[in-house]
Image: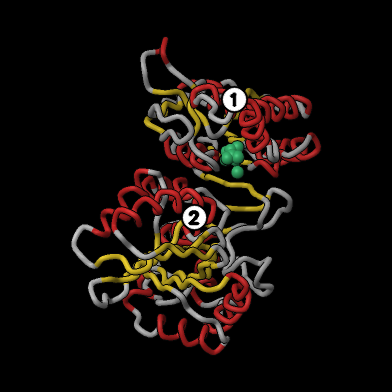
Amino acid sequence: MQRPLVVQKFGGSSVANADRIRRVARRIGRERAAGSDLVVVVSAMGDTTDELLTLAHAITDEPDARELDMLLATGEHQSATLLSMALHALGVEAISLTGPQAGITTDGRYGRARIANIEPRRIRAEIEKGNVVIVAGFQGQSETAADQAEMTTLGRGGSDTTAVALAAALKADRCQIFTDVKGIYTADPRVVPDARQLPVIGYEEMLELAHQGAQVMQVRAVELGWVNDVVIEVLSSFEDAPGTLIREDPLVEQRNKVRGLAHDRNVAKVTLVAVPDRPGVARSVFEPLAEAGINVDMIVQNVGHGGATDMSFTVPRAELGKAKKVLEAVVRDLGAREITTDASVAKVSIVGAGLHNAPGYAARMFGTLADAGVNIEMISTSEVRITCMIAEDELSTALSALHGAFELAKPDAIDVAATGMAAG
Ligand code: ASP
Ligand code: MG
């Protein structure tokens, strides 16, 4: 019989120091002893990536993109080698590989490269030799002639993508993402005390949660899992407890239920006051923002009065300064009255597959917020999500009220069925 192949990923907090690396090695050793072949993806230790970025910016305001990727990649080299040594110390055969050695090629966009191909020959050969293969996450090699290939990195949180991509390429039996939380919750347990861990969640719902600020997994990794049908398990590296399975949810059609709440404080509201109401205005506003790489969300344009209209939208809070600079020129060109901004807002979302064909959820959400005395400033929706923008200092009130109104603390039949499936 073939041995099961398991891909495991350990995030930065799981390998933050020597003790934790040894603990991860013991866990890998146990899985190995149970008879699995293992490919292990690691992130850089603790805050290493942030520290390397800070260092680079202490040297120069504009670090060269190529050199920056060379630098950032060292974070994962460090953790991969140390984990391999920790396994050796336990008598477990292991070898560390860089992304390029693991056969991961990408396009050439430094800092946000996308995986183009994985040729896992070397990984397979090392498994064949009896090694646990440790792969440095978050990196690859640009897909060019060998004598010009460059180190690239996959964007912040990119080790998740490395792990899911390897699981797909190797047709792994399991893909486990070990992190510092126990799994995916109905809401952030730090804000909503009776938030409940979900045994299973569909890809689509997980994508919305990740987009809306649930910082558990990189969005691209979830997308990649969905496209390649990789069942992803998110679980704690600090305790032995079942996690949350992210998978195609076969029961999705049978339920119209809110699955979880997401929130995001990383937003700011921008209003352009008295913009001329004529064709092409939206383009003059949003094109320059797009060119500056600023993501715009939740756009609202009021009904025009006397040839002018107000236009509001949200941008990531960290980009507010940059957005203002871009928009000041736009306001001048268009002859709008002024720009106002508000950085003390937050988004709260209800997420669940099937929300769009179940009327009443929007009304219940708005009613619940009203009863809690929370004012809604903007609304946006997707197939599986309804989002309201509110004042940031009302966020925890809003989350608790919604968690209660949609009865999220209580497991339902779907969770029970899902748990049964997960065990099977
Ligand atoms: N070390 C990288 C980061 O901090 C990649 C990762 O953690 O997944 O973004
Ligand atoms: Mg990370």
Residue 216 to residue 30: above or below = below
Asked whether the residues under the numbered discs 2 and 1 touch, taking CB atoms below 8 Å apart as contact, a structural biologist would say no
Residue 389 to residue 175: above or below = below
The residue at 37%/50% (across/down) is 329
**In terms of image quadrants, where is residue 137?**
top right
Residue 342 to residue 238: above or below = below
Task: Identify which amino acid the numbered label 2 is placed on.
Answer: Pro
User: Looking at this rendering, what residue extends furthest in the bottom direction?
Assistant: 371
How far across and down, in percent of the image, does residue 204 sit? 41, 60
Q: Which residue is mark 1?
A: 71
How far across and down, in percent of the image, does residue 395 sit? 59, 73
Task: Identify which amino acid the numbered label 1 is placed on.
Answer: Leu
Neighbourhood count class around disc 2 (C-alpha, 10 Å): few under 14, some 14–19, many 20 upward: some
The residue at 43%/62% (across/down) is 339
Element on which disc 2 rests: strand
Front-lying residue, 254 or 305: 305
